[in-house]
Amino acid sequence: MDETTHDARASAATLAFPRLLLLENRKAGGGGESEIAQRLRETGREVLAPDTSSIEEACDMAREKSGDVDLIVVAGGDGSVNGLLSCLMDLSVPMLVVPRGTGNDFARSLGIPLEGDEALSLLDTGMLADVDVSFANGKPFVNAASVGLTAQVTKYQTPERKSRFGSVSYIVSAFKAVQVSRPFRAEVVNLDEPDETPLKTRCVQLLAGNGRYFGGGMVVHHDTRIDDGKIYLYALKPASTFALILHGPLIGLGRVDLSPDAVVASGTGFRLKTRRPLPVHADGERLTQTPVTFEVKHRALKVLASKEFASQ
């Protein structure tokens, strides 16, 4: 080892998280691997930045290198985080998300700045936290899982629309989805109260939230946190297109509970049945279909979050 390398490693050792593994999705939000890797190195830390072309390769790299690094930096959107959940939950190494998607709801839930440079400042100012991960038929998600209207929105959220409209693409897709949404019959059992009569209702949307945000900044529930050990569920009953559009502010602020057209519940798990199989989407991806069981694993994922979030 030459003197320069020795001095660099000695300097890195005095920093928090001196050894980093960067996992990057170049497609999410147009982030460039070399740019982020360079900025990380400029902090004086050692950076492993492997060239991975798929989520599977990224997971393999995380498992292989987890014993050699202090922090895994995931540069990408909510879909990237979702794809890596299964392997990251099994590791003792914490994760920092550098937002590079369009929604970035997981980062919002952790109080992470949405600008890359500001997110990297958490390497020095952030605090470690353990957050919840929820599951839909055993498949993990961190933001919210939905059936119906929101799932239809995900269908319209094409890469072209995301690229064209950016952070407002969700609103554009939601307006289109409202016009074609169809009601469905749902039967919901709260697994905390399995002997109670199941809730039976017609709805156009059913959402089960793990984190605080979904859909690019809309609030799951005004009281929720991503580390409170609960799933917040609401079912929105059928209404006219105009009425559904008027629900937008209530949905955005997490106050669907104020609507007479909504049913709201919270618990550690729910079982949902529908008359016909319907797709279940979460974190911008299709995970499974109904019937579906939602469950939460309390504080299952180690993350680096903002000091404001971690100290609450």
Image (spheres, helix red, strand yellow):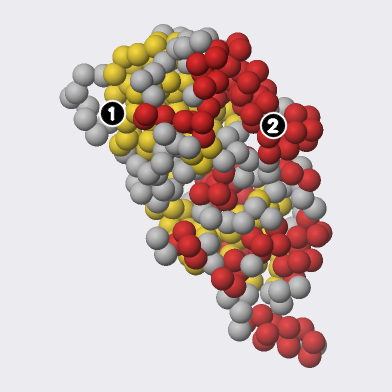
From the image, which quarter does the N terminus lie in? Answer: bottom right
Q: CA distance from mark 1 to mark 2?
A: 33 Å
Q: Is residue 89 left or right of residue 296?
A: right
Q: Amino acid at mark 2?
A: Ser
Q: Residue at x 58, y 35 (%)?
A: 215
- Which quadrant: the C terminus? bottom left
Residue at 53% x, 62% y is 306
Q: Secondary structure at mark 2?
A: helix
Which numbered disc, 1 or 2, marks the residue that appears first in the sequence?
A: 2
Can you say whether 102 is above or below 87 in the image? above
| Label 1 secondary element | strand
Label drawn at residue 228: none
* Whole-percent x, y for residue 164 in the image: 79, 33
Q: Position of residue 78 (x, y in %)?
A: 61, 42
Q: Residues within 10 Å of mark 1 (few under 14, many from 20)?
A: many
Q: Quick one: which residue is furthest to the bottom in this view?
A: 3
Residue tagged 1: 190
Residue 172 in view, yes or no: yes
The kind of residue tagged 1 is: Asn
Q: Which mark is residue 169?
A: 2
Which circle, 1 or 2, is nearer the viewer?
Answer: 2
Q: Position of residue 49 (x, y in %)?
A: 74, 61
Relative to the observer, which residue lies in front, 13 or 120? 120
Residue at coordinates 61% horizontally, 69% vertically from top-left? 123
Q: Nearer the viewer, residue 145 or 254?
A: 254
Residue ID at (79%, 90%): 3
